[in-house]
Image (tube, rainbow, N blue to C red):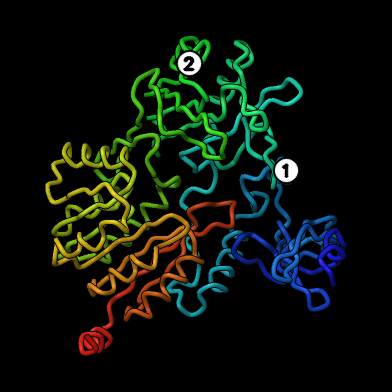
Amino acid sequence: MKKNNIEKQIYEVTIEKNVFGGYGIGYVEEQTLFVNKGIRGDRLLVTVDYTKKELLFCSIKKILSPSKHRTFTLCKQNDLCGSCDWVNMNYDDQIELKTDIYHEIFGSKVSSLEIQKSPIVYHYRNKAFLPVQAKDGKKMIGSYMRNSHNVIEHESCYLFPQVFKKIFDVIKDWMDRYDISVYDEKSHSGVLRHVGIRASSDMKSFVIILVSTTKEVLAKIELINEICSKFPMVKGIVINIQNKANNLILGEKDKVIFGVPHFTDFINDIKLKIHYKAFYQVNIPQAINIYKEIYEKTDKDDIVIDAFSGIGVIGFYLANKVRKVICIEENKEAVESAIDIAEKNSLRNMSFIQNRLEMVIDKTIKKEKNVSVIIFNPPRKGLSESTINSVSLHSIKKIIYMSCDPMTLKRDIQLFEEKGYELVFLKGYDMFPHTWHIESLAVLKKSLDKKIYMEKMV
């Protein structure tokens, strides 16, 4: 069937399984249908939105017979909002589907039979950057509607702490009262683009970020006074300047208009100072479960490289156990925070390198000579092949890999296995309830037989 004849056609389909990306999969006339928001067990009428490599990507037109998982309704905005996928599903059912997806990807490699549940299911995210938009004279702070750049106004959200909503409401009222100009991405005009909140896991330390096309924002003193009088946990308010016509949220320059540009948190007894631009896990209670597992996988004599280290949280977690930790991170603000944290906590067995990993991993391993463990926590795109080659050539005995994307993790595990590593541990964690995303921890060890073979080949 030609593409033009396929798109916008209507099919009746039963969803047989869910896959990574949140799609429900069904089959009609030997065609594979990927149905957005389809749930295993649904019988649906769907319309084809587009095709890709002979796969049909579809939207639900009508639910003919709902899945047994569609018995729970919590969020009235879920059909429109693009922030989460499964909030209107019982949490045990979410875990069941995620476990199926994980086993579909990794099969018998998985060490645990079930995805580990999050200690906190609702209001768990300590970070929000919401777009600002004006429509028909009404100014809104909210989330993008699914598959669009149209904003749906923020109401009761089950991802963010409830105090976030109160802060957004104060900022929204300030925008209305003082007629704050709102950015329009089509004309590249206006001032306020996004509003961000970064917060500690105990909700005692906040930074608010106003993403603007200019450092000068009207009535900023009035906003500072109102925020600080109502929310004493706010330690800083920053104007981040993003004046380029692109989809990046944050710009390079900023102006602190109140307090400091960082918030504080604690990991064990270590006080962290976290710059608002620095990476920090959004679900700290679950992240700590992973850090504990990493801790158990290291020994007191290990020299560890913590790659993509952010502000160095994993390194700090290990510092009092292992012999040495070398943190490598590209983000300047994160490295500056990490150095300050290490000094204030007298962690003298830690060092920090600010650079792209690919640029320094080889010479760092050569310089340290006895590196025994490398911990990777890369962005979704995973590791470069050059990084995997460098690590493998030096025969690092253990790789610990924390990943937010099972597909790139699977690819990188296969590349390591081709270089003589053996996967000895793999487990999934629900870091992001109400979405289809899955965090992973993998451990690989260098195979002695393969190492000897490679040495003989050289």
Residue 53 in view in this figure: yes
The image position of residue 318, as x and y in percent, is 23, 55
Question: What is the crowding at mark 1: few (fewer than 14 residues within 10 Å), some, or many (at least 20)?
Answer: some
Q: What element carries label 2?
A: loop
What residue is rendered at 29% in x and 73% in y? 392
Picture layout, residue 33 above or below residue 284: below
**Residue at 59% across, 33% down:** 131
For residue 393, side relative to residue 39 (left or right): left
Which mark is first along the chain, 2 or 1? 1
What label sits on residue 80 in the rendered view?
1
* Amino acid carrying mark 1 in the image: Leu
The kind of residue tagged 2 is: Glu
- Mark 1 touching mark 2, by CB under 8 A? no
The quarter holding residue 304 reads: bottom left
Location of residue 400 in the rendering, given as x and y in whole percent from the top left corner? 32, 65
- Residue 404's x, y, as percent? 46, 58
> Would residue 365 appear left or right of 95 to someone viewing this image?
left
**Mark whose residue sits in front, 1 or 2:** 2
**Residue at image coords 68%, 42%:** 81
Looking at the rendered image, the quarter that the C terminus falls into is bottom left
| Mark 1 vs mark 2, CA separation in Å | 34 Å
The residue depicted at 21 percent of the width and 89 percent of the height is 456
Q: Is residue 177 above or below residue 84?
A: above
Q: How crowded is mark 2: few (under 14 residues within 10 Å), some or many (20 or more)?
A: few
Mark yes or no: residue 163 visible: no
Q: Mark 2 points at which residue?
A: 216
Residue 449's mark?
none
Determine whether, in the image, residue 173 is placed left or right of residue 430: right
Q: Nearer the viewer, residue 442 or 368?
A: 368
